[in-house]
Image (cartoon, rainbow, N blue to C red):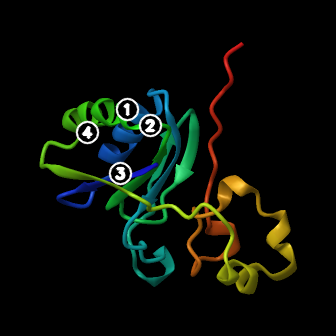
């Protein structure tokens, strides 16, 4: 099951970082995707790209966060997600339930990646920007398994 958090404004990097780290503390979220307008490259006069610290790793943001898509285990977690959004998004937001992240590789993926399609892991399906350079596509931050 997927949900979309749609803030009433674009998020600044600090707000997005706090929200994503708070959401990461919840059990039942499989993966998250940040969507928004692509930032203009610095070489073309764009702003300095900021970094977020997520799970202790620095991640350079390529977009201005506008929507957060999540694959979740069940509907029960939505209320916990809503609480985290209330704490971090003071200007309002909407939460929509639906299908937002692709679950399988497509013909477009075959055309884009060619023979390298088989090298792309299943957890990357639906997370990449088809128009981005390969090195800028996505970064996966794994949860540490507790023993």
First in sequence, mark 3 or 2: give its number: 3
Depth check, front residue: 78 or 92: 78
**Mark identifier at residue 77:** 1
* Label whose residue precedes the other's in the sequence (1 or 3): 3
Residue at (44% x, 28% y) in the render: 26
- Name the side, left or right, on which 86 lies relative to 145: left
Looking at marks 2 and 4 on the same chain, the residue that comes earlier in the sequence is marked by 2
Q: How many other residues sit within 10 Å of disc 2, few (<14), some (14-19) or many (≥20)? A: few
Q: Are marks 2 and 4 in contact (CB under 8 Å)?
A: no
Q: Residue at x 37, y 72 (%)?
A: 37
Does the residue at mark 1 contact the one at mark 2 (Cβ under 8 Å)?
Answer: yes
Q: Would you name the residue on which mark 4 appears? A: 85
In the image, which is nearer the foreground, mark 3 or mark 2?
Answer: 2
Nearest-to-viewer mark from 1 and 3:
1
Tell me if mark 1 has few (under 14), some (14-19) or many (20+) residues whose alpha carbon lies within 10 angstroms of its own. some
> Which mark lies nearer to you, 3 or 4?
4
Which quadrant of the figure has residue 106?
Answer: bottom right
Which residue is at 71% across, 83% downward? 112
Q: Relative to 29, is 104 above or below?
A: below
Q: Could you tell me which secondary element the residue under label 4 belongs to?
A: helix
Image coordinates for residue 51, horizontal then vertical, percent? 48, 51
Q: CA distance from mark 3 to mark 2?
A: 28 Å
The residue labelled by disc 3 is 13
Distance between mark 1 and mark 2 Cα atoms: 6 Å
Badge 4 vs badge 1, beta-carbon distance below 8 Å: no
Determine the CA span between mark 2 and mark 4: 18 Å
Determine the secondary structure under disc 1: helix
User: Between disc 3 and disc 4, whose residue precedes?
Assistant: 3
Q: Which mark is residue 74?
A: 2
């Amino acid at each position: 099951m997927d949900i979309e958090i749609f803030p009433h404004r674009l998020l600044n990097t600090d707000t997005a970082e706090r929200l994503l780290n708070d959401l990461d503390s919840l059990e039942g979220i499989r993966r998250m995707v940040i969507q928004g307008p692509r930032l203009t490259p610095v070489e073309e006069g764009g702003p300095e790209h900021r970094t977020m610290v997520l799970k202790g790793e620095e991640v350079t943001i390529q977009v201005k966060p506008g929507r957060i898509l999540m694959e979740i285990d069940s509907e029960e977690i939505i209320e916990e997600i809503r609480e985290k959004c209330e704490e971090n998004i003071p200007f309002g937001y909407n939460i929509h339930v639906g299908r937002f992240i692709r679950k399988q590789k497509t013909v477009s993926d075959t055309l884009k990646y060619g023979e390298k399609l088989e090298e792309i892991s299943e957890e990357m399906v639906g997370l990449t920007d088809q128009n981005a350079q390969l090195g800028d596509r996505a970064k996966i931050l794994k949860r540490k398994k507790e023993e």
